[in-house]
Image (cartoon, rainbow, N blue to C red):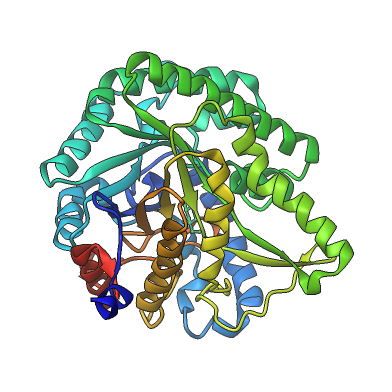
Amino acid sequence: MEKKTQKNLKFPDGFLWGSGTSAHQVEGHNHNDWTEWERSNAKRLAQHSKKYWEKSQHLFPEMGLESNYISGCACDHYNRYEEDFDIAKSLGQNAHRFSIEWSRIEPEEGVFNEQAIEHYRQVIWALKKRGIEPFVTLWHWTLPYWIAKMGGWEKRKTIDYFLRYTEKIIEELGDDVKFWITLNEPEIFSGNCYLKGIRPPQKKNILSYLRVIKNLIKAHKSSYKIIKKINPNSRIGIAKNNIYFEAYKNRITNLFLKKFIDWWWNFYFLNKIKNQQDFIGLNYYFHNRINKGFNKNENKNTTDMGWEIYPEGIYHVLKNLKKYNLPIYIIENGIADAKDEKREKFIKDHLYWIHKAIKEGVDIKGYFYWSLLDNFEWDKGFWPRFGLVEIDYQTMNRKIRPSALEYKKNIEKNAIE
Ligand code: IFM
């Protein structure tokens, strides 16, 4: 008996097992601020990648092609969602995260597209019919073009637009969805778009950056109230990308910096919305050893994108979230691994550390691998392959990767070995 419990690490009953996608990354045929940006930046991104990714260029020749940076038809998931949910079901998954594309719902100011709303109703029903619990994200980084032209999240008016959009969606679809995620990774969005200036609208301005964060906080808090008013039983959170920070060699300056960065990146936003959250949606990808303000990771094992694989980090991140006393769903954790050589171990190792956190009292209720499908990885385009399911972008054929079948075994046993 003792031997069995050591070998089989059981997850709590009712644990949710799934995967996620986002509208712009998989649906195809969108028109929003990103599609506009892709058009004017594809050439530059292709040229840049030839220099920056020189070493892996031979592995991913598409990096150097402009077409890699145009989302276009993506995975055509907008038309093939039934087929994709059949696959999710066949992989044993009982939950799925996806996002609603705001630019489809409100293509022009104040004009709501009823057909698009109906589409998402069908998407939700398609999941429920298969016994899959929908987790729906209201905003996963893309904006209707008319809002972006008006100044996007820098403008307070965007909060009002977001609230009107939220209200419309909840009134229409709220009865069929229990779990809502208002915002995806506000800190990654604001950092890339307004501090580093590498994604649309490509601004590098600390005041804009702070303004955007402030507006996103306000948008979340007010949309929380709207959702609760319409459907008090909804469970609402955000997708929060938390990083496991360490101080390189425990040097005093690094310890000090680590403390500050940890607070700002991991907790500032969560603290601000602590009374307007029913669960914490955690996205975990990164571990950073801070040295004089820069990362000094060992990088012994990395993904195709050069990100360090550090499963133990998720355990520390989870333990640090325990103080909020809220259920936690891990709504993103995944790896770009085109050859599918590391994914199986990646998932198992993360699950091992998640299980340890559960054993030590952290209330973790679900795990969503990122992503169900290969998809459009923003300014990197299509070459990074995150999917449990491989997409042939020429034929749109779907092929289940072997690691997905291993993940399925964990799901079926509700355990890891
Ligand atoms: O693909 C993204 C996703 O849109 C947001 N979280 C991180 C993923 C991998 O970079």
Look at 42% across and 52% down and name the residue there: 330
Look at 29% across and 54% down and name the residue there: 12
Q: Nearer the viewer, residue 86 or 34?
A: 86
Please provide percent x and percent y for residue 168.
Answer: 35, 18
- Can you name the residue that lies furthest to the front here? 2
**Numbered marks: total:** 0
Q: Nearer the viewer, residue 125 or 409?
A: 409
Compared to residue 36, the image places residue 393 above or below, namely below
Q: From where the camera sits, is residue 367 visible?
A: yes
Q: Is residue 117 left or right of residue 267?
A: left
Please provide percent x and percent y for residue 167.
Answer: 39, 18
- Can you name the residue that lies furthest to the left here? 129
Please provide percent x and percent y for residue 40.
Answer: 57, 50
Q: Is residue 195 left or right of residue 156?
A: right
- Check the picture and name the quadrant holding the C terminus: bottom left
Q: Quadrant of residue 344?
A: bottom left
